[in-house]
Image: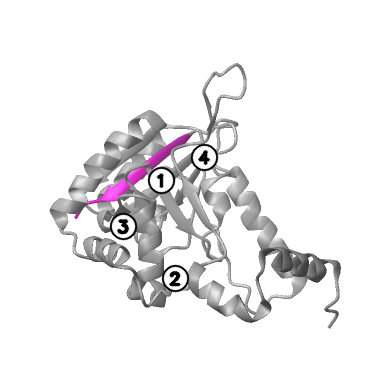
């Protein structure tokens, strides 16, 4: 292994200038990076607050989220159960149409909550196909896998409504937080002109501070799933005011975003 590279020489020069020895790297790391198993009293209190929330606390967060969502043009819709979500999405499909063309189609995540909505049945009477942005590659050769990937990509491009869930929702900024997973393509929330997200009320948090504390210091959250290489944060539909400071929705993504919160 080549050790005397330009990079190593550059780092060595920096360490020498800062008076830092290689032997102290571990000690420095211990000061900079906190131990997930040893949270500070403040971080432990945040996690405890999140884990001890009751229905009234979740509803208070929902009201706060609804207020913060208004200026972002985010439609927050409380619903009682999954059946009401399915009915609401069916009505949305009935009342809206694609930006281009007349053929309607919907694409969704392969996600437990989204699958439980049974949108294929809900939209059967309207003859609107529902595609799932995932496929099983078991036993596929390279050519078959490539064709399957192209088919799913085309379905996402052609669909005008994309249905996802989210891992968390931050009330302070009306922000959806989505971890990266193989069966939950980001394009479902980006390519269709209407994005529909469905979450449970217990998935709401107050702000980023709570999110980071939960991801790092809550044993259940850390042990259930490793942190992915990235997360997507979405605050309302796509918007820009680059041209003459005129707000335009849908410039770089969906022009509308509907968030259904199942309250139970």
- Residue identifier under label 1: 175
Picture residue at 36% right of the left edge, 62% below the top: 213
Percent across and percent down for residue 99 are 55, 30
In this orientation, which residue lies closer to the viewer: 136 or 185?
185
Which badge, 4 or 3, is on the more N-terminal residue?
A: 4
Picture residue at 19% right of the left edge, 64% below the top: 52
Which badge, 4 or 1, is on the more N-terminal residue?
A: 4
Where's the C terminus, which quadrant?
Answer: bottom left
Q: Is residue 57 visible?
A: yes
Residue 117, disc = none
Asked if residue 120 is among those painted magenta in the image, a careful observer would answer no
Say above or below: 161 vs 262. above
How many residues crowd mark 4 within 10 Å: few (<14), some (14–19), many (20+)?
many
Which badge, 2 or 4, is on the more N-terminal residue?
A: 2
Q: Separation of disc 3 and disc 2 at Cα? A: 25 Å
- Please state the extent of the stretch shown in magenta in the rendering: 256-264
Residue 34, disc = 2
Nearer to us: label 4 or label 1: 1
In the rendered view, does 8 fall on the left or right side of 96?
Answer: right
Q: Are discs 1 and 2 less than 8 Å apart at CB?
A: no
- Residue identifier under label 3: 203
Q: Are discs 4 and 1 less than 8 Å apart at CB?
A: no
How many residues crowd mark 3 within 10 Å: few (<14), some (14–19), many (20+)?
some
Say above or below: 235 vs 43. above
In this orientation, which residue lies closer to the viewer: 123 or 63?
63
How many residues crowd mark 1 within 10 Å: few (<14), some (14–19), many (20+)?
many
Which badge, 3 or 1, is on the more N-terminal residue?
A: 1
Element type at marker 4?
A: loop
Which badge, 1 or 2, is on the more N-terminal residue?
A: 2
Residue 104, disc = 4
């Amino acid at each position: 292994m080549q050790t005397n590279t330009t990079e190593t020489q550059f780092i060595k020069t920096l360490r020498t200038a800062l008076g830092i020895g290689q032997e102290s790297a571990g000690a420095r790391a211990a000061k900079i990076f906190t131990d997930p198993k040893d949270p500070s009293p403040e971080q432990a209190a945040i996690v405890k607050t999140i884990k001890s929330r009751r229905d009234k606390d979740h509803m208070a967060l929902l009201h706060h989220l609804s207020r913060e969502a208004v200026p972002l043009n985010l439609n927050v819709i409380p619903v009682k159960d999954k059946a009401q979500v399915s009915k609401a999405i069916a009505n949305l499909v009935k009342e809206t149409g694609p930006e281009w063309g007349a053929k309607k189609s919907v694409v969704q995540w392969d996600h437990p909550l989204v699958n439980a909505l049974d949108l294929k049945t809900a939209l059967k009477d309207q003859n609107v196909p529902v595609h799932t942005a995932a496929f099983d590659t078991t036993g596929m050769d390279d050519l078959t896998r490539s064709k399957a990937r192209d088919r799913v990509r085309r379905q996402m491009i052609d669909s005008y409504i994309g249905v996802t869930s989210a891992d968390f929702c931050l009330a302070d900024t009306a922000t959806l937080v989505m971890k990266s997973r193989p069966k939950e393509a980001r394009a479902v929330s980006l390519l269709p002109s209407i994005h529909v997200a469905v979450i449970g009320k217990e998935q709401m948090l107050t702000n980023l501070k709570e999110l980071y504390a939960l991801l790092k210091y809550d044993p259940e959250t850390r042990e259930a799933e490793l942190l992915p290489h990235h997360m997507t944060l979405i605050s309302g539909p796509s918007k820009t005011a680059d041209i003459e400071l005129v707000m335009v929705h849908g410039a770089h993504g969906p022009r509308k975003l509907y968030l259904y919160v199942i309250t139970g």
